[in-house]
Image (cartoon, helix red, strand yellow):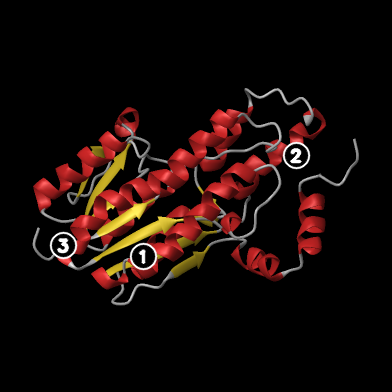
């Protein structure tokens, strides 16, 4: 494997952006370890590239993460790039959404990324090189109604990444924060399916608005996941990777909102997600 970069991608099942990351890095002549929870390994069996292999990895499990990283190190001696992509959606009003649901989102979206970082960093520090790519979101910068737990989990990723970037620089490790806009994948469908089991009480009159928020990232103008993944791969593998990669549909809108007064944001989101009526 001399001359190849070893790239570990989490959340790589077919239909998601992670699947496209694997193909994009493979096209750049990297050797890719495509990982996901063991139950989804069958969703990755159609990878055709000879330089992609699959591995079971549950980012919410200390044991699973440690075992997966040790397996890669034992086989290849290094991990050059970590793509912290695994994540789940979490939609619903914060005052009513079950804490177990919120806890699961934070465990996977936030602690899952840090769990990988803590396992991979000692090896990257020993080789004095490596890139850690944490996947955040535009809603990590500007949170929206009906998705507060997901927005909070991604805001924490932003904070962690900005800290890690400075803390890991002495060891020659790059930290890149990816900030996707609306990217076309199965993410919105999976999030919408979870909502079918909810019977809102205080917010029963907002059921359709909540469902609309779950579908919001999958609008017709959403950026193609293949285009997005190739863009990220090219940036990450460049001689000087950027600190942030902001790309995709609606990133311009959220950039404007991030600079807007809070009352402007409140008016916009109240109208967009039907939170402007009194009960």
Q: Observer-nearest residue: 130 or 169?
A: 169
In x, y percent, where is residue 80? 22, 60
Q: Secondary structure at mark 2?
A: helix
Labelled disc at residue 209:
2
Marks 2/3: CA distance? 50 Å
Marks 1/3: CA distance? 16 Å
Q: What residue would you read off at disc 3?
A: 126
User: Can residue 11 be seen in this snapshot?
Assistant: yes
Question: In the picture shown, does residue 104 fall above or below 139?
Answer: above
Which quadrant does the C terminus fall into? top right
In x, y percent, where is residue 118? 30, 51
The mark lying in front, picked from 1 and 2, is: 1
Say which label, 1 or 3, has the lower sequence index.
3
Q: Is residue 277 left or right of residue 219?
A: right
Q: Secondary structure at mark 1?
A: strand
The residue under the point 41% across, 57% down is: 134
Q: Observer-nearest residue: 227 or 140?
A: 140
Label 1 with label 2: CB-CB less than 8 Å: no
The residue under the point 66% across, 24% down is: 198
Circle 1 packing at 10 Å, graded few (<14), some (14-19), many (20+), is many
The quadrant where residue 147 appears: top right
Q: What residue would you read off at disc 1?
A: 175
């Amino acid at each position: 494997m001399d001359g190849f970069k070893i790239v570990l991608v989490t959340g790589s099942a077919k239909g998601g952006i992670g699947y496209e990351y694997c193909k994009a890095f493979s096209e750049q002549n990297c050797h890719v370890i495509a990982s996901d929870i063991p139950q989804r390994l069958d969703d990755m069996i159609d990878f055709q590239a000879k330089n992609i292999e699959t591995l079971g990895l549950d980012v919410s499990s200390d044991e699973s993460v440690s075992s997966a990283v040790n397996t890669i190190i034992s086989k290849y001696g290094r991990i050059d790039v970590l793509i912290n992509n695994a994540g789940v959606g979490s939609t619903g009003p914060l005052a009513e959404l079950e804490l177990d649901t919120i806890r699961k989102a934070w465990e996977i979206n936030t602690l899952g990324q840090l769990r990988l970082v803590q396992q991979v960093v000692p090896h990257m520090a020993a080789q004095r090189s490596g890139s850690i790519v944490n996947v955040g979101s535009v809603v990590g910068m500007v949170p929206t109604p009906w998705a507060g737990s997901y927005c909070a989990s991604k805001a924490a990723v932003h904070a962690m990444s900005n800290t890690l970037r400075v803390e890991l620089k002495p060891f020659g490790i790059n930290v890149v924060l990816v900030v996707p806009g609306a990217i076309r994948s199965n993410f919105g469908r999976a999030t919408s399916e979870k909502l079918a089991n909810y019977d809102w009480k205080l917010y029963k009159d907002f059921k359709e608005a909540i469902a609309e928020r779950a579908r919001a990232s999958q609008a017709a103008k959403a950026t193609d996941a293949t285009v997005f993944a190739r863009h990220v791969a090219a940036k990450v593998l460049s001689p000087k990777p950027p600190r942030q990669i902001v790309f995709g549909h609606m990133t311009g809108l959220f950039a404007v909102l991030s600079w807007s007064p809070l009352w402007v944001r409140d008016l916009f989101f109240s109208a967009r997600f039907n939170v402007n009526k009194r009960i």
